Image: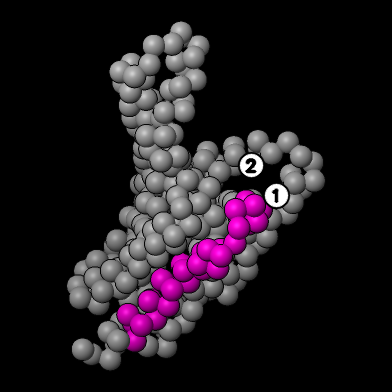
Amino acid sequence: MPTIWLEAIGSVSMVGLISLCGVITIPINKKTLETVIFILLSLGTGAMLGNALVHLVPESYEGSTNTVYTSVLMVAGFMFCFCLQKLLHLRMHCAAIEKDDKTRSHDCHAGEAHVHEDAHEHYGHIHPTGYMSIVSHALDNLTDGIIIGTAFLHSPAAGFACALAVILHEIPMEFGGFGVLVFAGFSRWGAVLINFLSAMVAVLGTVLILWLGSSIAWVPGLLTPLAAGMVIFIAAAGLTPQLLKEPGCGRSVIQLLLMLVGITAMVLVKFLD
């Protein structure tokens, strides 16, 4: 295997290893985990907003020959998440009603209460935000992999510098992404595995660009705005409403500060790119 392949795949694999950060929460007891998830969810919301508005949106327009087309792709990513969430809610609702009709005979009010309970039971308490986060994370990492591979085709020095920038960018995103998955209902080990598999999609992107060369250099121009729209939806419509449910003044202030930490981290990484 050529040296450039070993260097590129080795570098992009380091990005995937960061996604295993959630392993540190495995020994933590449930009560402590709730505090950790509170922190990671707030941090993740800020990091996602920062990633979308500071990184993905500007990168979508860099080199774009048609800004309207790029904007439409962002809207498409946003609407994809909207439709996916609607579809998942509809399936949960219909499945719960069907099960309720077969096993229970309560009045209307009691039936509505069971619909909500059974829907979560049927789908293992997985919130649609979790599924959307997986898709957007995979797209983002595929794009990162292609960018790293392209940099290595230019020179090893450019490749290593690009990989380092991506790693710095991924550190707050991976911690926040793990918190989002656990909050959505995945087990800790499940969230670690899913986070890792999503991150390793970057390796696929690098392999594709090394194999096919510049013939797929147009792919980031398509995937980046799509990912931007999806991440904006997840942060604004999926996570922020959950944070707004927090009634405590002190915890709300902590949420705000943690969101600002996540946003600031993404801004600082932008200066290091």
Say which label, 1 or 2, has the lower sequence index: 2
- The three-letter code of the residue at mark 1 reads Gln
Based on the picture, tell me whether residue 26 belongs to the magenta stretch: yes
Q: How far apart are labels 1 and 2 at the CA level?
A: 7 Å
Give the quarter of the image for residue 241. top right
Q: Write the residue at 32% across / 76% down.
A: 149
Residue 109 rendering spot, x and y as whole percentages = 50, 11
Of 242 and 100, which appears nearest the observer?
100
Q: Do the residues labelled 1 and 2 touch (CB within 8 Å)?
A: yes
* Residue 122 visible in the picture: yes
From the viewer's perspective, is 99 left or right of 32? left
Image vertical order of residue 15 relative to residue 266, above or below: below
Number of numbered discs visible in the structure rendering: 2
Q: Residue furthest top?
A: 107
Which residue was labeled with disc 2?
A: 243
- The three-letter code of the residue at mark 2 reads Leu
Range drawn in magenta: 7-36
Based on the picture, tell me whether residue 158 belongs to the magenta stretch: no
* Residue 61 visible in the picture: no
Image vertical order of residue 136 relative to residue 154, above or below: above
Residue 246 rendering spot, x and y as whole percentages = 69, 39
* Magenta-drawn stretch, dominant element (helix, strand or loop): helix
Q: Is mark 1 on a helix, strand or loop?
A: helix
Q: How crowded is mark 1: few (under 14 residues within 10 Å), some or many (20 or more)?
A: many
Residue 189 rendering spot, x and y as whole percentages = 44, 60
Q: Write the residue at 37% across / 88% down.
A: 156
Which residue was labeled with disc 1?
A: 255
Q: What element carries label 2?
A: helix
